[in-house]
């Protein structure tokens, strides 16, 4: 693998000048996971000049930055984020919205620091770097195929847990924001699925990493597709049935599960392990009720739902955060599934652990409920028809109906609704009533 000249600066030398800017900017980002807790300091794991900061033109600084916050459990490291900073002496007016701030001290004093991914020149450089595999400092770039040169980049402005750039409507590059050591399942699983011949998931064509951490993945951009969430809301708004789509989506989910079971190990749990799954739901509920006290009155009812579940006895790798927004329907009607990262708030080893497939099914069932709840008037009937059609489609392709064990399905749906309560409280408080209404229903019936 060729190694380009390493342009890595001593990370600590840069930090004093960047820290005040990061302090102001980082906690406001949608992808910042530590919202609601003070930031008390930063340390740099790595700082790499992908374009030199020598002042002759725009510089591109790649950082892996640890954010110190109080309340971190003993023995766990501070969260690490991937940040790409553009640095220029003069910021052109078109880049003004990307400004993070001006450096006040040190050798770079006076320079404008801005979000590098919003600068087409710098985003283009990142793509060119992916096209020619090799190393720059601690960063390693890989490609599985020859990629076309010079595709125009644009940054996606959707609300995301990460950040994505589309290149020439041909490829999409996802930049992971919170970074942990270990293969990111959003690279690991699509690669395994491609190897197993599953065409439901766009296959990665390039990626980059540092140490054991995956930092970004490039895959084909499905330009003629629309995501399942938008399609569902449109159907609701137009009073249209969505069961044909839901059934096809159930089949697609089952195909992905079958391919994952072919590609990666599956395991039958013993009784004690099965009980641990229910105990883990209890633990998550307890933690969620500490974070969102509105859950407290429902805790006994929700615990009863977990206790009633007999337990899913076979586990395998699954999607882990399946919802309508993670699905894309092409103009030919075929569904694709994306974003195998799992629930962003969970630790990586938990996200990579084998789980019962019913967990994904439950995630999608919650999503039909979400769609119906965000529509006025609330259309409960629409949601239950979609939920049934989705399970029917799943059963057709998997040979196992997820409704065969209703107590288990209900437990996983409840577990997901608990997760959603915390997610919404943290990221979108206006949405909190959506999962809370499910909590009320699940805890009391
Ligand atoms: N291969 C793809 N083709 C077309 N659009 C995509 C593709 N992958 C992701 N997207 C779109 O990009 C956005 C973010 O993707 P996602 O993987 O869900 O990111 P995040 O983990 O940040 O939520 C979504 O709106 C999704 O519809
Ligand atoms: O797509 P992400 O990996 O970022 O997932 C997170 O954000 C989702 C919202 O964008 C969130 O999903 C919840 O809201 C959806 C509607 O916006 C709904 O369809 C899902 O069913 C619901 O869970 C997801 O939970 C979170 O991990």
Image (cartoon, helix red, strand yellow):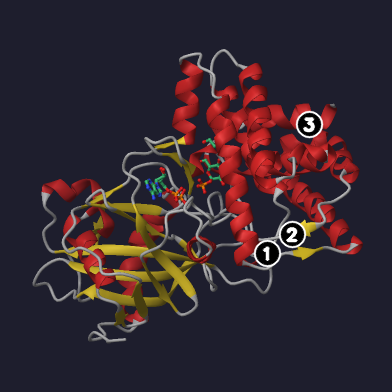
Query: How crowded is the residue under tag 2: few (<14 C-alpha within 10 Å), some, or many (20+)?
Result: some
Q: Are marks 3 and 2 in contact (CB under 8 Å)?
A: no
Labels 1 & 2 near each other (Cβ < 8 A):
yes
- Disc nearest the viewer among 3 and 2: 2
Viewer can see residue 319? no
Whether ligand 2 has any atom under 8 Å from the Cβ at mark 3 is answered as no
Give the Cα separation between the discs numbered 1 and 3. 26 Å
Q: Say whether disc 3 or disc 2 marks the residue closer to the N-terminus.
A: 2
Query: Residue at label 2?
Result: 315
Identify the residue at horizontal 61%, vertical 59% (top origin): 260
Mark 3–mark 2 distance (CA, rounded to whole Å): 24 Å
Secondary structure beneath dot 1 equals: loop
Provide residue 348's location: percent of width, then percent of height.
60, 65
In this picture, residue 278 sits left or right of residue 246 = right
Give percent across and percent down for residue 355.
71, 57
Residue 77: % across, % down = 58, 72
- Residue 425, by quadrant, is top right
**Relative to residue 324, is residue 26 depicted above or below?**
below
Task: Report the side of 244 relative to 415 (left or right).
Answer: left
At mark 2, the secondary structure is strand
Label 1 beta carbon less than 8 Å to ligand 2: no
Q: How far apart in space, not on screen, are marks 1 and 2 (Cα)?
A: 9 Å
Q: Which residue is mark 3?
A: 442
Q: Which residue is mark 1?
A: 353
Up/down of 127 relative to 411, above or below: below
* Place of residue 244 in the rendered image (x, y in percent of width and height, measured from the top left): 55, 27
Secondary structure beneath dot 3 equals: helix
């Amino acid at each position: 693998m060729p190694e380009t000249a390493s342009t890595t600066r001593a990370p600590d030398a840069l930090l004093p000048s960047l820290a005040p800017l990061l302090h102001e900017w980082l906690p406001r980002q949608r992808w910042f996971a530590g919202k609601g807790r003070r930031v008390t300091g930063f340390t740099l794991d790595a700082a790499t000049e992908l374009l030199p900061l020598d002042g002759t033109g725009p510089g591109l600084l790649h950082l892996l930055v640890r954010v110190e916050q109080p309340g971190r459990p003993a023995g766990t490291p501070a969260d690490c984020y991937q940040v790409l900073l553009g640095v220029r002496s003069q910021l052109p007016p078109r880049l003004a919205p990307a400004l993070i701030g001006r450096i006040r001290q040190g050798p770079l004093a006076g320079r404008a620091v801005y979000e590098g991914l919003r600068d087409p020149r710098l985003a283009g450089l990142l793509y060119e770097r992916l096209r020619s595999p090799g190393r720059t400092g601690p960063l390693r770039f890989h490609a599985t195929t020859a990629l076309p040169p010079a595709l125009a980049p644009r940054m996606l402005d959707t609300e995301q847990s990460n950040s994505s750039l589309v290149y020439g409507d041909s490829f999409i590059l996802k930049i992971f924001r919170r970074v942990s050591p270990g293969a990111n399942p959003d690279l690991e699983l699509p690669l395994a699925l491609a190897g197993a011949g599953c065409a439901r998931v766009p296959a990665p064509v390039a990626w980059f990493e540092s140490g054991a951490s995956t930092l970004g993945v490039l895959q084909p951009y499905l330009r003629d597709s629309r995501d399942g969430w938008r399609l569902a809301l449109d159907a609701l708004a137009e009073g249209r049935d969505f069961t044909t789509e839901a059934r096809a989506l159930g089949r697609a989910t089952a195909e992905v599960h079958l391919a994952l079971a072919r590609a990666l190990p599956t395991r039958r749990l013993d009784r004690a392990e099965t009980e641990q799954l229910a105990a883990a739901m209890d633990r998550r509920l307890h933690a969620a009720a500490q974070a969102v006290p509105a859950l407290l009155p429902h805790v006994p009812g929700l615990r009863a739902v977990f206790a009633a579940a007999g337990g899913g006895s076979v586990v395998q790798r699954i999607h882990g955060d399946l919802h309508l927004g993670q699905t894309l329907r092409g103009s030919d009607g075929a569904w694709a599934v994306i974003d195998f990262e799992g629930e962003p708030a969970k630790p990586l080893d938990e996200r990579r652990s084998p789980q019962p497939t019913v967990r994904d099914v439950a995630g999608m069932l919650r999503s039909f409920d979400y769609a119906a709840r965000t529509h006025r008037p609330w259309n409960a009937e629409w949601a239950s028809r979609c939920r049934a059609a989705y399970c029917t489609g799943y059963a057709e392709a998997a040979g196992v109906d997820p409704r065969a064990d209703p107590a288990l399905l209900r437990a996983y749906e409840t577990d997901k609704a608990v997760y959603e309560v915390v997610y919404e409280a943290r990221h979108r408080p206006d949405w909190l009533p959506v999962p809370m209404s499910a909590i009320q229903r699940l805890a009391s019936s």
